Amino acid sequence: MEPEYSNDRSGDLAKPEPTGIERLLRRRIRWLILSLLFLVTVINFVDRLTLSYVAPILRDTYDLSNADYGDIVSYFVLGMMLCELPMGWLMDRKGARFGFSFAVIWWSIANSLHAVAQTKLQFSVLRFWMGTGECGNYPGGVKVIGQWFPPRERAYAIGIMNAASLVGGMITPPLVALLVLRINWQAAFLLPSLLGFIWVLAWRRYYRPPAEHPFLSDEERTHICAEQDELATAPGYRELLRLPETWGLMLCRLLVGPVIQFYLFWLPEYLTRTRGYTMALIGLVGTLPPLLGDLGSVGGGWLSGWLIGRGLTTKQARRTMMLGGAGLCALSLVVVRAETPVIWWGAICLVYLGHYALSASMFATVTDLFPNRVASRVTGFTGVAAGFSGWLFPKITGRLVDQVSYVPVFTMVAVMPLAGVLILILLTRGRRRATWGEDVR
């Protein structure tokens, strides 16, 4: 287990001579750590999204139906759901340095093997394998941010890390289109996998927990430790599941998570089959929604802080952002019904903006309601909930598209975020920050 904050430097590693980058960031090591979390989240989403942009080719080459594709996608989310808690346990038990290294290598191997898959079974097995590794990204990221950032900076840091998923979304369409058109579809899986292995080398070089980091200054150590709220006793999973706050966050993410997964995994298919877009055109315009999503993630986190500075309580600011984001997600109804490209493309962009503004405040609410020592486990619980709905929803989507149309699917993703936010508000109404004394309740 990684040590907590301490001024005892006796166990530190011998300090090597810092490089130019390390000298530049010597008093801002936490931002170097955050940049590594940002990069791995970009790689994570490029890896997971590549399949959706190659899907039209794979479906035609291997004669896969919408239901087949939905099943393949669901196995990825099933892997994430089943291993969310084990991966969180690994991060806590072995530390984020080892945990992230293992997770990235594990999922990168699975992603690279997509290049040799040919059947629904093979793709399903590889997607499941890949999901068992990629699920470590957010529990590990929340853990690291909790260790390296004081409470007042965590929401902003989480927003930056979460924005990386959209950067991955912006990079993936042109990258996949370029690799497929210039080389072949197999290259679209192999290159991002190589980047994962390179990232692990950088992570092993630069990451240590704060108590061990050889380049952490006393000034930054004092800043990181300010306002820390560690627990005298760490509660177990059973104690966490007794709290309505835990269930509110789980149910909110269960209903919010499938929305963006639908757009990430099914939008290229929808644009190709229903709107008649080519891969080159999708690669050209497909960067716009993620760009708005980045604005929603980072800007939403900043706006939440601005509202707090204007006199709103933290709870009021978070709820305002989540309800506003859910309202924009309802524009999914416009996406499927509008005929003018400018209108339905604009609606897609606003759905992305709303979803990521909502998500930034939803993840920040974890740190609002729970002390740092249990925040990663609560995040793991929400990941299990999101994994269950993410596993089930693609199956429902594939069958609805085959037997009806995209209309009922877009209708569902329009109303689910608002339902999730309202449930979270109901279950946390009047609740204060969860605390434990020497005796765990």
Image: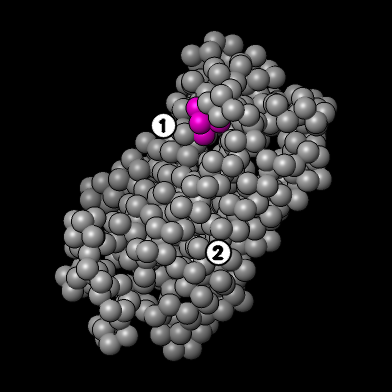
**Residue located 39% across and 80% down the image:** 3
Comparing 66 with 319, the one in front is 66
Question: Is residue 174 rendered magenta in the image?
Answer: yes
Circle number at residue 291: 1
Q: Nearer the viewer, residue 322 or 4?
A: 4
> Which of labels 2 and 1 is toward the front?
2
- 233 is within the stretch colored magenta: no
| Residue type highlighted by circle 2 | Phe
Instruction: Report the amino acid beneath label 1.
Output: Leu
Q: Residues within 10 Å of mark 2 (few under 14, many from 20)?
A: some
Indicate whether 338 appears above or below 310: above
Q: Residue at x 26, y 62 (%)?
A: 29
Residue at image position (75%, 36%) is 69
Please tell me whether mark 1 sits on a helix, a strand or a loop: helix
Q: Which mark is residue 64?
A: none
Q: Is residue 93 above or below residue 144?
A: below
- Mark number displayed over residue 102: 2
Return the x and y of residue 105 as percentages of the image width and height: 56, 58
Outermost residue, left side: 219
**Magenta stretch, residue numbers:** 172-176
Mark 2 in CB contact with mark 1 (< 8 angstroms): no
Dot 2 or dot 1: first in sequence order is: 2
Question: In the displayed structure, does residue 27 sit left or right of residue 12?
Answer: left
